[in-house]
């Protein structure tokens, strides 16, 4: 581990406020640098000797592309497995042996799996071998998606810059909160901000799980739950919309869900506070009407871009490159 104190990135409970602030500063620094030719060259020269393994066995567009781009922005080389049917897993190789093999060729493993807990298992394995490499969780089933939460924090901080950042704000999360890993990871981070009020808006049967609420109770984060957006809309600074996570259905739960009231379109936007923002991790389903895409309050396209800069920042912090960038 370098002086940054960051090695594996597995679960958002591992982050404290100084680290979050540091990553946001770093993201802004690399974003600004990349705008000029000489700055982009500086970034390119930071890690040409480093190789990343992108192991994504669950569908991904944004997370994969932004990590891939982030590696290339730092001059890194990348290898990938996105389809386990062409890896030795089909010959019966264990998950542990596959991960250990990646660590023979790569300096970092970035991984997404449909099952929960796999990134944590990979990190544990690394901690038990002589030449461990960092593991980044790029989405582990329905449990965690820490790098999405980091880019969401960065987006919130940037959007609320004028009024002093996330401290003191009211943030609602809406949709399939029971199975949405982005909401889970982001909720955990809220304990790091002062006087944040969380509002959970979910259809019956899709409410946020007790473990998250227990965590918020333990850390004194104020929250309220409701099934109606109208109950909380007037006081919001941000609304984080999510899609129905159909891929985790056990018994066609999604088919029977009444999700129509958990969507945002021009009609809802007319009643939405004029200086509040709308976020969504994407991909969208019918809950986000493309008719609102040009409203200045929507942030989801900006979240995508912020994701790339935050992932550059994360790699730079893990490899301890911020000294070379003169940021602190
Ligand atoms: C999210 C995910 O994979 O959890 N997508 C993403 O990484 N931006 C959200 C989702 O799939 O609903």
Image (spheres, helix red, strand yellow):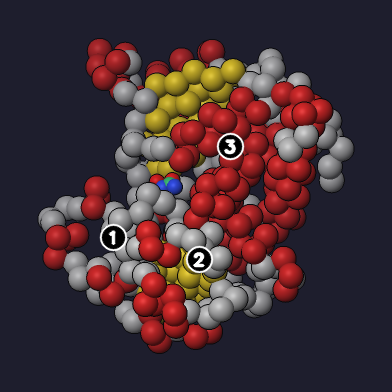
- The quarter in which the N terminus is drawn is top right
| Residue linked to disc 2 | 295
Residue 117 appears at what percent x and percent y? 39, 42
Identify the element where label 1 is drawn: loop
Find out if the beta carbon at label 1 lies less than 8 Å from the nearest ligand 1 atom: no
**If you read the primary sequence from the N terminus, does the residue marked by circle 3 or circle 1 appear first?**
3
Task: Tell which of 298 and 205 is nearer to you.
Answer: 298
Q: Is residue 117 left or right of residue 24?
A: left
Q: Residue at x 47, y 26 (%)?
A: 54
| Residue linked to disc 1 | 286
Q: CA distance from mark 2 to mark 3?
A: 37 Å
Identify the element where label 2 is drawn: loop
Query: Do residues under tags 2 and 1 come within 8 Å of each other at their CB atoms?
Result: no
Mark number, residue 8: 3
Rate crowding at label 3 as few (under 14), some (14 to 19) or many (20 or more) other CA atoms within 10 Å.
many
Q: Residue at x 37, y 25 (%)?
A: 82
> Can the viewer see residue 4 in this picture?
no
Q: Residue at x 53, y 84 (%)?
A: 235
Q: CA distance from mark 3 to mark 1?
A: 35 Å
**If you read the primary sequence from the N terminus, does the residue marked by circle 2 or circle 1 appear first?**
1
Query: Residue 32 is drawn in which quadrant?
Result: top right
Identify the element where label 3 is drawn: loop
């Amino acid at each position: 581990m370098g002086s940054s104190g960051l090695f594996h990135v597995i679960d958002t409970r591992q982050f404290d406020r100084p680290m979050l602030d540091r990553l946001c500063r770093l993201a802004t620094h690399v974003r600004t640098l990349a705008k000029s030719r000489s700055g982009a060259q500086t970034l390119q020269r930071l890690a040409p000797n480093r190789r990343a393994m992108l192991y994504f066995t669950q569908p991904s567009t944004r997370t994969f592309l932004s990590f891939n781009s982030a590696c290339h922005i730092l001059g890194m080389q990348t290898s990938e497995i996105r389809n386990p049917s062409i890896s030795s897993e089909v010959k019966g190789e264990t998950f542990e042996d596959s991960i250990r093999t990646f660590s023979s060729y790569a300096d970092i493993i970035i991984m997404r799996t449909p099952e929960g807990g796999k990134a944590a298992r990979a990190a544990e394995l690394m901690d038990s071998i002589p030449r461990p490499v960092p593991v980044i969780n790029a989405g582990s089933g329905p449990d965690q998606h820490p790098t999405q939460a980091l880019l969401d924090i960065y987006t919130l901080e940037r959007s609320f810059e004028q009024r002093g950042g996330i401290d003191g704000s009211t943030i609602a999360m809406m949709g399939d909160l029971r199975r949405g890993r982005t909401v889970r990871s982001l909720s955990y981070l809220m304990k790091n901000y002062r006087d944040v009020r969380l509002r959970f808006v979910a259809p019956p049967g899709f409410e946020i799980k007790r473990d998250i609420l227990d965590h918020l109770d333990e850390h004194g984060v104020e929250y309220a739950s409701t099934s109606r957006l109208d109950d909380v809309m007037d006081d919001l600074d941000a609304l984080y919309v999510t899609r129905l996570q159909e891929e985790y259905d056990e018994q066609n739960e999604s088919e029977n869900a009444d999700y129509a009231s958990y969507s945002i379109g021009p009609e809802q936007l007319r009643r939405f506070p004029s200086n509040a923002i709308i976020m969504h991790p994407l991909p969208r389903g019918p809950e986000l009407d493309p008719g609102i895409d040009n409203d200045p309050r929507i942030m989801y396209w900006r979240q995508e871009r912020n994701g790339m800069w935050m992932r550059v920042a994360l790699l730079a912090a893990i490899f301890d490159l911020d000294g070379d960038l003169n940021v602190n």
